Amino acid sequence: MTDDLAGQGLVLSGTGGVWRVRRDDGVVVEASLRGRVKKSNSGKRADGSLRRDTISAAAETLKLAVGDRVLLEQDDASDAMAIGEILPRRSRLARRAPGGGHGERIVAANVDQVIIVFAAANPEPHPRMLDRFLVIAEANDLVAIIVINKVELVGGTEAARARWIDYERAGYTIHYTSVKTREGLDALHDAFAGVVSVLTGPSGVGKSSLLNAMFEGLDLRVGEISESVNKGRHTTVGGFVHPLPGAEGGYVVDTPGLREVGMWALSPTELDQCFPELRPFLEVCKFADCRHSVEPGCAVREAVARGDVSKARYESFIKLREELEGVKPGR
Ligand SMILES: Nc1nc2c(ncn2[C@@H]2O[C@H](COP(=O)(O)OP(=O)(O)OP(=O)(O)O)[C@@H](O)[C@H]2O)c(=O)[nH]1
Ligand SMILES: [Mg+2]
Ligand SMILES: [Zn+2]
């Protein structure tokens, strides 16, 4: 049995067994992970016993993520495509496993930026939740862009803006959009060109609708929000990478709405770095290990008192910091 090298590709989707890979010639093929790739990644201890967390096949294949670049091989005997090698990642977006479990979950590999979508209304936006998404992007060293969709529900872009000024002041780019009126869609379209973007945000805010409206031919599934409970259903299952038509090689990773956003591998002492508007003050605090809560000579609290840093963002920082401190490390 000989294996032919069948080129490189980008992993578009898949969970567990079969993965959809877009070859560099544009053809999308199905491929499985080769045994030896699994083996090199598997949880065998030095003594040959299996680590508990890698006993299931699913846990093994989680090592491969959408967005990964892979080497494909053709297996002559079975005529099937196989993933022979996962190429080194230039970046990744990771979060803690859902349900309070331990273990990092790679949401996507080789990401350039994270586009975080909230709705101006329906569902009602929670800034604290936006702060968590932003911290995750910052902790992964990824550019974060904010989208406030459905602005027509609150009277348009200018009316929607007031609520998000803290984020503009912190330095974030915000796009105000409406799929209904097509407001802001051209500018957002340009932000996707030529790069790999992860699109994230709560369920029902219009992520799939925005992509469908901007990129003809994508046809992502759009869910209806139940008016009675006003809670979005999860209509996008698993992570998908979509090549964007007419976006100069741009890709988007469409993720399920995340009900629970965990912060992974972030030590409480690094959290202040993840709030860009706090960074100029961190070196000025009297104590190098200042927690910015009750310490004397805290430049962060002074900035908040002067109005140079938003009180709401500061409070969000304190809340997240307490949460991170409550998480026992190393378990
Ligand atoms: N009024 C209004 N409704 C919108 C807008 N954009 C999307 N919607 C509606 O919001 C609902 C949810 O849209 P989706 O695109 O499925 O939301 P999603 O963020 O992809 O949701 P998940 O896939 O569950 O994460 C649908 O009923 C859309 O028609 C908008 O700009 N204005
Ligand atoms: Mg969706
Ligand atoms: Zn301080």
Image (cartoon, grey):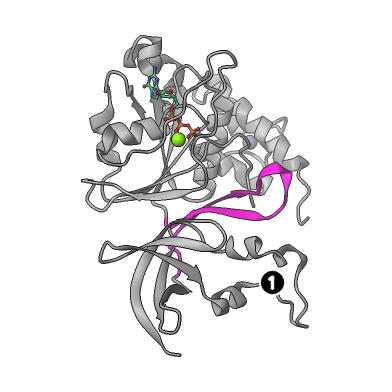
Residue displayed at 44% across by 49% down = 240
Q: Quadrant of residue 73?
A: bottom left
Residue displayed at 63% across by 36% down = 260
Whether residue 253 sits left or right of residue 15 in the image: it is left
Does residue 92 belong to the magenta stretch? yes
Q: Position of residue 17 (x, y in %)?
A: 55, 63
Residue 179 vertical position relative to residue 112 in the rendered view, above or below: above
Residue 283 seen in this snapshot: no
Does residue 288 belong to the magenta stretch? no
Residue displayed at 75% across by 82% down = 48
Whether residue 52 sits left or right of residue 235 in the image: it is right
Q: Which residues are magenta?
A: 88-110
Whether residue 310 sits left or right of residue 296 in the image: it is left
Q: Quadrant of residue 35?
A: bottom right
Q: Is mark 1 within 8 Å of ligand 1?
A: no
Residue 276 seen in this snapshot: yes
Residue 122 vertical position relative to residue 34 in the rendered view, above or below: above
Q: How many numbered marks, from 0 up?
A: 1
Q: Position of residue 115 (x, y in %)?
A: 41, 39
Residue 228 vertical position relative to residue 224 in the rendered view, above or below: above
Instruction: State the residue position of label 1.
Output: 43
Disc 1 marks a residue whose amino acid type is Gly
The extreme bottom residue here reads 1
Dot 1 lies on which element?
Answer: loop
The image quadrant where one finds ligand 3 is top right
In the foreground, 300 or 257: 257
In the foreground, 147 or 238: 238
Whether residue 173 sits left or right of residue 124 in the image: it is left
Q: Position of residue 331 (x, y in %)?
A: 78, 55
Quadrant for the N terminus in the image: bottom left
Residue displayed at 47% across by 61% down = 19
